Image (cartoon, grey):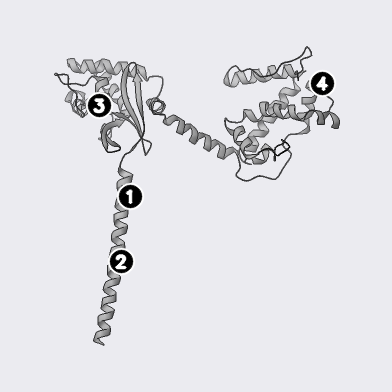
Amino acid sequence: MVYSAKIRLSNEIKNKSNQISIFTENLNADLKLYCMEEKKIIQYKGELNLNGLIIPCYVLNDGTRVLSGRGMQEALKMVDDNKTTSGHRIVRYLNQKTLSPFISKYLSSDHFSPVLCYEGGKKINGYKAEVLADICDVFLQARKEIDLSPRQLIIAEQCEILMRAFARVGITALVDEATGYQYERENDELQRILKAYISEELLPWQKRFPDIFYKELFRLNGWDYTVNGIKKRPGIIGKWTNTFIYEELPNGVLEELKKKTPKSESGNRTNRYHQLLTTDIGEPNLEKQINKVITLFQVSDNMKQFCDNFKKMKMRQIGQMELPFEFDENGRIKE
């Protein structure tokens, strides 16, 4: 019995030891993950040129836009009397008592705190991009209401230059452009649009273009709306359908539809574009565009007049555009 008790005790100790070991491994993994999440890594970098004042800028792994602290200090001319710069000069200047009343409106005590970020093994002290405008606001407001020191006046002058530089464009947009991050944002936005418009599954075919669409199209070109007439014109009608209908959907949608509906050996599309549009967003917007075009068809006497009306509509929406078609003396498109 004693021997059995020893074995049971030994097994219990082993089990407890294993549990402790597993707990320790999980804890270490959690701590490692936590550290990885907390560490600010530079993913994109570039330089802002603000009226000739160059400031290095970054986009971090969490999407935070950051400006180099040293670059900001140089742009603001925050220097000692001996003209040397320091990595923490901004904090020292903002802690001056004369500026305290103008900083108090920024309720968060850490609003002007630096952001420590990493580029490989290199540490970089920076500040959130929007902080630059806030610093400029502090000095410019102080200049209006109190007597500043000679150095503070120089900084205020630099603030005015900087504020003019990004008065019309948000500082975030400037950072995104300088670092190249805007292209990833645009791609993310494109993916969001494509997901909204294009279904992941091919939907059953349903009639989306009413007969009146093709009947009016044939009338404008002086074609016979008969079986034989329709058979003679499939290629050009497809081109017009893309121009006046599918190209009016958000940018990237038509290209994605083409990718998802490859051509067969005979050169025809394996499916119709509209079979890939989502029922909640894609199809309603397609129908809306078809109805717009049908209305323009019906108020036009020929294809040239329709294209002129179509251009007028587009000019009101996005500015002037040219259509790649030529017309004969009857206002019909030349083939």
Q: Residue at x 27, y 20 (%)?
A: 75
User: Is 19 drawn above or below residue 217 in the view shown?
Assistant: below
Rendering quarter of residue 170 = top left
Most foreground residue, 291 or 49: 49
Task: Indicate the position of residue 333 as horizontal and vertical percent values.
Answer: 75, 18
Q: Which residue is mark 1?
A: 33
Q: Which residue is mark 2?
A: 19
| Distance from Cα at disc 1 to Cα at disc 2 | 21 Å
Q: Give the mark nearest the N terminus, 1 or 2.
A: 2
Task: Indicate the position of residue 81 as horizontal and vertical percent values.
Answer: 14, 18
Q: As shown in the figure, which amino acid type bears the numbered disc 2? A: Gln
Q: As shown in the figure, which amino acid type bears the numbered disc 1? A: Leu
1 and 2 marks in contact (CB < 8 Å): no
How would you rate the neighbour count of disc 2 (Cα within 10 Å): few for under 14, some for 14-19, many for 20 or more? few
Left or right: residue 158 compared with residue 216:
left
Query: Which numbered dot is residue 70?
Result: 3
Point out the image quarter for the C terminus: top right
Task: Indicate the position of residue 13 as horizontal and vertical percent values.
Answer: 26, 73
Query: Which numbered dot is residue 222?
Result: 4
| Distance from Cα at disc 3 to Cα at disc 1 | 30 Å
Q: Give the mark nearest the N terminus, 2 or 4.
A: 2
User: Is 25 drawn above or below residue 235 in the view shown?
Assistant: below
Q: Residue at x 85, y 25 (%)?
A: 224
